[in-house]
Amino acid sequence: MQIPMSSPDVTDDELAAVSQVLQSRYLSLGPRIERVLASYVGAKHAVGVNSGTSGLHLAVVAAGVQEGDLVITTPFSFVASANCILYERGVPVFVDVDPVTGNIDPGLISEAVHDLVDGGSHAERWVPGNLSASRLGRGKAILPVDVFGQPADMDAIVEIAYHHGLVVIEDSCAAIGSEHKGRKAGSLGDVGVFAFYPNKQMTTGEGGMLVADRDDWDALFRSLRNQGRDVFGAWLNHTRLGYNYRLDEMSAGLGLAQLKRLEELMARRARVAHWYNKRLSPRELIETPTIVPETTRMSWFVYVVRIKAPASRDRAIAELKARGIASRPYFAPIHLQPFHREGFGYRQGDYPVAEKLGAMSLALPFSSVMTEAQVDHVCEELIAMVQRTQRGRSE
């Protein structure tokens, strides 16, 4: 049985929506999905862009990040959440993560802010090996990531930011529909960003969305995504440096149809996660995801287990692949990526919790169209691999 890592959930409604766009003469910018998504999240404004990465970049611009400025963020994430800071020549300041959720640790954020913003005595603790603390700019923002769809501890993060004049950019690229203490992910900071890649809870093919309440940022985002054109000016009047980050209307049409089905899509994914939980817990060498009480609704992006020693995550990937089952490591910590190691001087051991999670975490096949028989097969093969490890240990 061949089981892919992910599969899109597309119906005749999505096909009809895209066809309707193609029959019109309006093929760019996607205003309809913006209005619907803003209402869903509870934000005043939503601005469509061509990827979550583009959205994060524009949020960093709005936060005023310039060369040398510091943005506190997590090393346990997809690399885009740090790269978007580098696009503006800012400096990602990594702090380690909570061992239960994998989300950024607010206690460590507080320590980093004290040393870097308040002039504490241990600034060098947070600075990469190739940089000098004395040559860095000022702290500008905190960029938490809702890892695997579970919201970060946003109340604590927002409180720290408020007391120190920092902008909070909530990377909810994997968390649309999730809720933290009854409030929707993406609406908890100064600006939130969603992504709609095909493996996400809902998709536009490629695409993303910024959500915010500030009128001036709404205008800024609309200008930045459209080559810096002033939205109130002439067609070819470029008032600032901008980018080609527009969301095309065909993608928006697909996304609007998906957004209308979001509750259904989330329920289907929750069902698949339940099947996995039922079959894989409790197991001695397989740790299933923990959803903390503050996450009052979990929108499942991926299903990630942790493979404990003496079993091997990498061996599990190889053995599952040999049996036609796709799986992935999730995540390889950002600071150990070749570009970041070579450019900033990071070393193994700098962020031990993120590194431990990176070595253990295994994303299993997951989508809203998975069948129970497919989940059974994945679990049977994974459990068999772990049992072989256990037998080898006892012999």
Image (tube, rainbow, N blue to C red):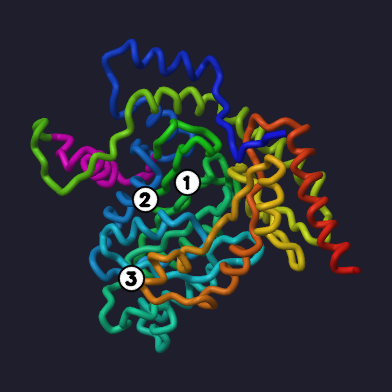
Residue type at mark 3: give it: Gly
If you read the primary sequence from the N terminus, does the residue marked by circle 3 or circle 1 appear first?
Answer: 3
Q: Residue at x 42, y 59 (%)?
A: 143
Q: Residue furthest right?
A: 395
Residue for badge 1: 173
Task: Report crowding for label 3: few under 14, some 14 to 19, many 20 or more residues within 10 A (C-alpha).
Answer: many
Residue for badge 2: 56
Q: Are discs 1 and 2 less than 8 Å apart at CB?
A: yes
Q: In which quarter of the image is residue 68?
A: bottom left
Query: What is the secondary structure assignment of the residue under circle 3?
Result: strand
If you read the primary sequence from the N terminus, does the residue marked by circle 3 or circle 2 appear first?
Answer: 2
Query: What is the secondary structure assignment of the residue under circle 2?
Result: helix
Q: Residue at x 42, y 40 (%)?
A: 43
273, 309: nearer the viewer: 309
Query: What is the secondary structure assignment of the residue under circle 1?
Result: loop
Residue type at mark 1: give it: Cys
Residue for badge 3: 139
Q: Give left or right: position of 13 versus 49.
A: right
Q: Residue at x 32, y 66 (%)?
A: 140
